[in-house]
Amino acid sequence: MNENSNAAFSFQLNLSKWNIVYTAIAISAVLTVIPLAMYGIEKQGIVNWLDATGRAGMITFTAAFIASPLHKLFPNSFSRWLLKNRRFLGIGFGFQHLIFHLPAVIWFLIIAKVPLDAMITGGLGFILVIFMLITSFNAPAKWIGARNWKILHTTGMFYLMYVFIISFYPGISGNPSLNQTYLTNYGLFELTLLVAVFLRIMIFARKMKRVISKQTSEQQIRS
Ligand code: HEM
């Protein structure tokens, strides 16, 4: 795909760079207002607010997560658009989660009991989101250095993916067990996350195959 097809894709969606961040924030804002307007700040309203903002963040996060492997495996105008805007998808997710999911979490903690392990797992997720968001800007990224940036963003990306996978796992924290309701309301989200991880595994396997075949041919030359 060339620059023209990428421009055409951006034009069709009219979405690139900071517009992605603003759109992500606007979507989560709407998904905050709707449940609160419908159910108020009662438990049901807060749970719906948590679910809606958690799911919105999941979509933006997954788009950033798959950008590179998708473009390597199946390059097309969409994957090029994802890759080009990956940083803004990540920033959009960070703002969505910190501005909208975090207040919902705090509110929920005030009105309901959350198991300690869930608080630790999710809390660590938020800490990573904060550091990843800050270092998505040039000056802090430069300050921590390329190596630390890579360690932070790779670890954070896989940890957050783990939190998302367990958030949609059957039978966990109020989720239904593996039944028709689960498949209808959660199945597609969980499947999308698993496919995203599978794309990364495919890239990793391809890289390993290249390393092994390079080592084998070097050994053959030496012997
Ligand atoms: C201390 C931190 C956190 C707490 C206490 C928390 C709590 C919750 C609660 C209570 C729900 C609603 C579950 C239900 O429907 O019964 C929820 C939904 C959700 N959370 Fe969080 N959360 C935290 C952090 C995070 C983080 C860091 C992520 C992502 C990386 C995340 C992703 C999600 C998602 C995707 C949903 C929607 C799941 C669904 O639709 O059932 N949460 N959260």
Image: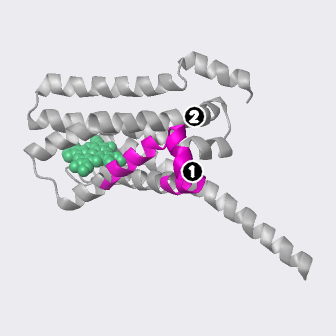
What is the span of residues highlighted in magenta in the rendered image?
124-152
Crowding near the residue tagged with mark 2, few <14, some 14–19, many ≥20 C-alpha atoms within 10 Å: many
The reply to whether discs 2 and 1 touch (Cβ–Cβ < 8 Å) is no
Looking at the image, residue 144 lies above or below residue 212: above
State left or right for residue 177 relative to residue 14.
left
Q: Which amino acid does label 2 sit on?
A: Leu
Q: What residue type is labelled 1?
A: Leu
Q: In which quarter of the image is the C terminus?
A: bottom right
Looking at the image, residue 199 lies above or below residue 9: below
**Magenta stretch prevailing secondary structure:** helix
Number of numbered discs: 2
Q: Quadrant of the N terminus?
A: top right
**Picture quadrant of residue 189:** top left
Q: Is residue 143 magenta?
A: yes
Q: Nearer the viewer, residue 189 or 49?
A: 49
Looking at the image, residue 93 lies above or below residue 205: above
Q: Is residue 131 magenta?
A: yes
Question: Looking at the image, is mark 2 or mark 1 earlier in the sequence?
Answer: 2
Q: Where is residue 20 drawn, in percent x and y?
A: 48, 26
Q: Which residue bears the numbered disc 2?
A: 82
Q: Residue at position x 40%, y 28% from top?
A: 24
Q: Residue at position x 29%, y 23% from top?
A: 30
Crowding near the residue tagged with mark 1, few <14, some 14–19, many ≥20 C-alpha atoms within 10 Å: some
Kindly state the secondary structure of the residue where label 2 is placed.
helix
